[in-house]
Amino acid sequence: MPDFKFTPQYIYAYKSGELDNKIKLSEKILKKCALCPQFCGINRNLEYGKCNSGIEPVVSSYNSHFGEEPPITGIYGSGTIFFSNCTMNCIYCQNYPISQLGKGKRVGFEDLADMMLYLQTKKCHNINFVTPTHFVSHILKSLRIAVKKGLHIPLVYNTSGYESPITLQLLDGIIDIYLPDIKYTDDSIAYELSGVKNYTYFNRLAIKEMFRQVGLLEEDSDGIARKGIIIRHLVLPGNIRNSMRVFDFLAENISKDVTVSLMAQYFPAYKAVEHITLNRKITKEEYETVLNYALDLGFENILIQELDE
């Protein structure tokens, strides 16, 4: 059985009334949406924002997931809730039917809360919100319902790392485990491959703030994450220098002790099959070049993946 001695932060926020305050603030933000760095200013109660999302949360799927990093997956799996649509437009997205085409079902706040509780009954170690940024207000409302009904396991915020400071303010004291990407260290590459501006600026602000909130990864006696940050980086073909700079940033601004998931599972998907650089898998040499660079810098807490041949 999972060890539930750890008390998630949102329990305290609920008891103190801080969760209610955050919900009220999120409702105001949603009327002139600034939940992501697109800052489209759309009233999401009446229209769809640039994320193609409105007043109702849209969920693609929810279940026990065993493909996350070991501290997140654990023994019984991570309770993932995959949200549809996205704040970015990555041409290589492996989940593009969900993120770009919006495949999913509109659900109510009670429904979303019940999903969390269902995943808890399946002994999942955490509730893992995947691509959640554009639905943060909806998540907070549903969380209040779920806590009233007995939710008590940690929350994971599984994100592209393209976050606005105001959204992270809403999440302070709510999220236990941050699982953000650092996709790019060059804004021109970010715009070409993901269609967003100022990715590096907002991503670096976000990583620093997430680290301030939860710190280094903390695990229980079974090696299950209870609090902290795990930073993900997907190595892209032909972009080795970009990957090296990720570790330069972390060494200079975060900590060489931070846990980094260095991902090797890239394959051409969606529009990447026609891209001059991204139309192939990464090579073993590319992955090992990045890994060795990180090790030489002094990083030790690197979650390494086997490269699919």
Image: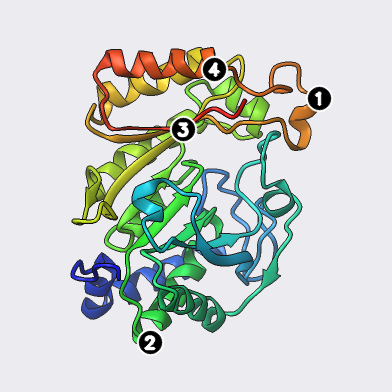
- Give coordinates of residue 15: x percent, y percent: 23, 80
- The mark that comes first in sequence, 2 or 3, is 2
- Give the residue pinned by disc 1: 274
Q: Nearer the viewer, residue 114 or 4?
A: 4
Disc 4: CA contacts within 10 A as few (<14), some (14-19) or many (>=20): few
* Point 61% across, 35% down: residue: 196
Residue 238 location (% of width, % of height): 61, 14
The Cα atoms of the two marked residues, 4 and 1, are separated by: 22 Å
Question: Is residue 139 shown left or right of residue 51?
Answer: left
- Residue 305's disc is 3
Q: Secondary structure at mark 4?
A: helix
Q: Which structural element holds mark 2? A: loop
- Residue 149 image label: 2
**Looking at this view, is 186 or 308 the one in front?**
308
The mark that comes first in sequence, 4 or 1, is: 1
Who's the residue at 41% across and 80% down the image?
Answer: 146
Residue type beneath disc 1: Glu
